[in-house]
Image (cartoon, rainbow, N blue to C red):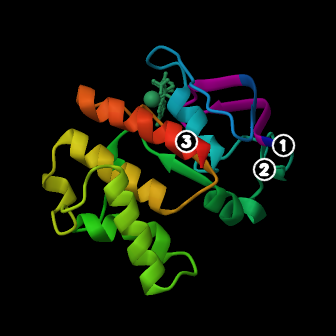
Amino acid sequence: MTAIKIQKLNFSYSDGHTALENIHLEINEREKVGIIGPNGAGKSTLFLHFNGILPPAKIKEPSIHVGGIPLTTNNLLKIRKMVGLLFQDPDDQIFCPTVWEDVAFGPSQQELTKTEINSCVNNALQEVGLAGFEKRAPHHLSGGEKRRVCLAGVLACQADILVLDEPTSNLDPRGRRELITLLGKLKKT
Ligand code: ADP
Ligand code: MG
């Protein structure tokens, strides 16, 4: 089964700058793929299309399918539940006064009990090595710690597809190794 299928995707920003031109991409279920390119190549722009944050030019003739579902306005909510996206800049993702609330935001939008939300948040914080940070203010954390808060928030949503934009930037060597191990473990489970 194809997890993400993109055909003939074009995208220009409102200032007229063309960031994506004729993109074709197929990623299968259970695949772990790295997308590599220089600054400005369009990686972040592409990732923002995976769950419809940036709409493709022709949403009526969908150029993107996620899990076989065409990315159209009607399917946006369904697709956003399937794709967890870690933004390149943590400051674009963090908005709650405490780490706990920030990580709990995604799960609390789903139909989960309080106990289930608690367990999602606690597991995610544990996985990124931030147990004990629950009451801290995310905006006072270091760059690497903020990155981990965002990653925990994405993991806590338990999406089928994880899209991570430069996930190791700002992490120290140990944080990088831990993240790579964690991603390997997630792929297995
Ligand atoms: P990457 O993530 O590969 O470094 P981006 O997707 O961020 O690249 O950017 C791709 C191109 O689109 C770059 O030339 C960048 O300057 C441009 N770009 C990114 N965001 C915007 C925006 N909001 N408005 C106009 N141009 C943008
Ligand atoms: Mg980028």
Residue 123 in sight: yes
User: Which of disc 1 and disc 3 is earlier in sequence?
Assistant: 1
Residue 69 lies within the magenta run: no
User: Which element type, helix, strand or loop, lies under badge 2?
Assistant: loop
Residue 91 in sight: no
**Residue lying farthest right?**
61
Give the residue at x 21% y 40%: 143
The residue that disc 2 covers is 67
The kind of residue on which mark 2 rests is Gly
Residue 172 vs 71, above or below: the answer is above
User: Which element type, helix, strand or loop, lies under badge 1?
Assistant: loop
The answer for how far apart the CA atoms under marks 3 and 1 are is: 18 Å
The circle drawn on residue 163 is: 3
Q: Position of residue 96 (x, y in %)?
A: 28, 67
Give the residue at x 44% y 41%: 182
- Rendered image quadrant of residue 7: top right
Going by the image, does 133 lie left or right of 96? left
The residue that disc 1 covers is 1
The kind of residue on which mark 3 rests is Val
Q: Quadrant of the N terminus?
A: top right
Is label 2 or label 1 in front?
1
- Rendered image quadrant of residue 75: bottom right
For the record, the magenta segment spans: 3-21
User: Which element type, helix, strand or loop, lies under badge 3?
Assistant: strand
Ligand 2 position by quadrant:
top left
The kind of residue on which mark 1 rests is Met
